[in-house]
Protein backbone atom coordinates (compact mmCIF):
# COMPACT_ATOMS: atom_id res chain seq x y z
CA UNK A 1 0.00 0.00 0.00
CA UNK A 2 2.50 2.55 1.15
CA UNK A 3 5.43 1.83 -1.16
CA UNK A 4 3.53 0.80 -4.28
CA UNK A 5 0.70 3.26 -3.75
CA UNK A 6 -1.92 0.52 -4.05
CA UNK A 7 -5.50 0.99 -2.98
CA UNK A 8 -6.84 -0.87 0.00
CA UNK A 9 -8.80 -3.19 -2.34
CA UNK A 10 -5.75 -3.95 -4.53
CA UNK A 11 -3.70 -4.73 -1.42
CA UNK A 12 -6.47 -6.90 -0.02
CA UNK A 13 -6.70 -8.84 -3.30
CA UNK A 14 -2.94 -9.50 -3.35
CA UNK A 15 -2.94 -10.66 0.28
CA UNK A 16 -6.01 -12.82 -0.27
CA UNK A 17 -4.42 -14.54 -3.28
CA UNK A 18 -1.21 -15.15 -1.30
CA UNK A 19 -3.07 -16.53 1.72
CA UNK A 20 -5.17 -18.80 -0.50
CA UNK A 21 -1.95 -20.24 -1.92
CA UNK A 22 -0.66 -20.76 1.61
CA UNK A 23 -3.96 -22.40 2.58
CA UNK A 24 -3.64 -24.87 -0.30
CA UNK A 25 -0.31 -26.01 1.17
CA UNK A 26 -1.22 -25.94 4.85
CA UNK A 27 -4.74 -25.30 6.13
CA UNK A 28 -5.04 -21.87 7.71
CA UNK A 29 -7.22 -21.77 10.78
CA UNK A 30 -8.24 -18.16 10.66
CA UNK A 31 -10.80 -15.98 8.97
CA UNK A 32 -8.41 -14.55 6.39
CA UNK A 33 -10.72 -11.73 5.26
CA UNK A 34 -11.06 -10.49 8.83
CA UNK A 35 -7.31 -10.81 9.43
CA UNK A 36 -6.51 -8.92 6.21
CA UNK A 37 -8.85 -6.06 7.15
CA UNK A 38 -7.43 -5.95 10.66
CA UNK A 39 -3.87 -5.76 9.29
CA UNK A 40 -4.79 -3.09 6.73
CA UNK A 41 -6.38 -1.00 9.48
CA UNK A 42 -3.07 -1.08 11.33
CA UNK A 43 -0.87 -0.20 8.31
CA UNK A 44 -1.59 3.53 8.21
CA UNK A 45 1.67 5.29 7.36
CA UNK A 46 4.09 2.57 8.42
CA UNK A 47 6.83 1.60 6.00
CA UNK A 48 8.14 -1.97 5.68
CA UNK A 49 11.37 -3.06 7.31
CA UNK A 50 14.49 -2.48 5.29
CA UNK A 51 16.47 -5.52 4.19
CA UNK A 52 19.35 -4.76 6.57
CA UNK A 53 16.98 -4.41 9.54
CA UNK A 54 15.25 -7.66 8.59
CA UNK A 55 18.60 -9.43 8.28
CA UNK A 56 19.95 -8.28 11.64
CA UNK A 57 16.84 -8.25 13.83
CA UNK A 58 15.11 -11.30 12.35
CA UNK A 59 18.00 -13.48 11.17
CA UNK A 60 16.07 -16.78 11.15
CA UNK A 61 13.25 -15.32 9.08
CA UNK A 62 15.74 -13.64 6.74
CA UNK A 63 17.57 -16.94 6.18
CA UNK A 64 14.27 -18.68 5.40
CA UNK A 65 13.34 -15.95 2.91
CA UNK A 66 16.73 -16.39 1.24
CA UNK A 67 16.24 -20.15 1.02
CA UNK A 68 12.79 -19.66 -0.54
CA UNK A 69 14.23 -17.21 -3.08
CA UNK A 70 12.15 -14.31 -1.78
CA UNK A 71 15.25 -12.36 -0.78
CA UNK A 72 18.31 -12.53 -2.98
CA UNK A 73 21.26 -14.25 -1.37
CA UNK A 74 24.22 -12.01 -0.84
CA UNK A 75 27.38 -12.87 -2.72
CA UNK A 76 30.46 -12.77 -0.54
CA UNK A 77 33.30 -10.87 -2.13
CA UNK A 78 36.81 -12.05 -1.41
CA UNK A 79 39.30 -9.30 -0.95
CA UNK A 80 42.91 -10.20 -1.77
CA UNK A 81 45.44 -8.72 0.62
Image (cartoon, rainbow, N blue to C red):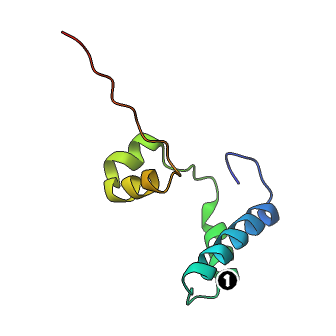
What residue appears at the point 65 percent right and 74 percent down from the top-left corner? 21
Tell me the residue at 39%/45% (across/down): 53
> How many callouts does the rendering have?
1
Image quarter in which the N terminus is found: bottom right
Image position, residue 45 (x, y; %): 63, 52
For disc 1, the marked residue is: 34
Q: Is residue 4 above or below residue 29?
A: above
Identify the secondary structure beneath mark 1. helix
Residue in the picture at 54% in, 83% down: 26
Q: Residue 37 lies in what quarter of the image? A: bottom right
Name, please, the residue furthest toward the left.
81
- Is residue 50 left or right of 11 when viewed as pictured? left
- Which picture quadrant has residue 41? bottom right
Q: Is residue 77 above or below residue 72?
A: above
Of 18 and 31, which appears nearest the observer? 18
In terms of depth relative to the viewer, which is nearer, 57 or 39? 57
Residue sitting nearer the eye, 12 or 75: 75
Mark 1 residue crowding within 10 angstroms, few (<14) / some (14–19) / many (20+): few
Quadrant position of the C terminus in the picture: top left
Percent x, y for residue 19? 64, 74
Amino acid sequence: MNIRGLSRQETSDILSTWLNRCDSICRLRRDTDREINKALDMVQEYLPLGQDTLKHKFAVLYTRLEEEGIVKKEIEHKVDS
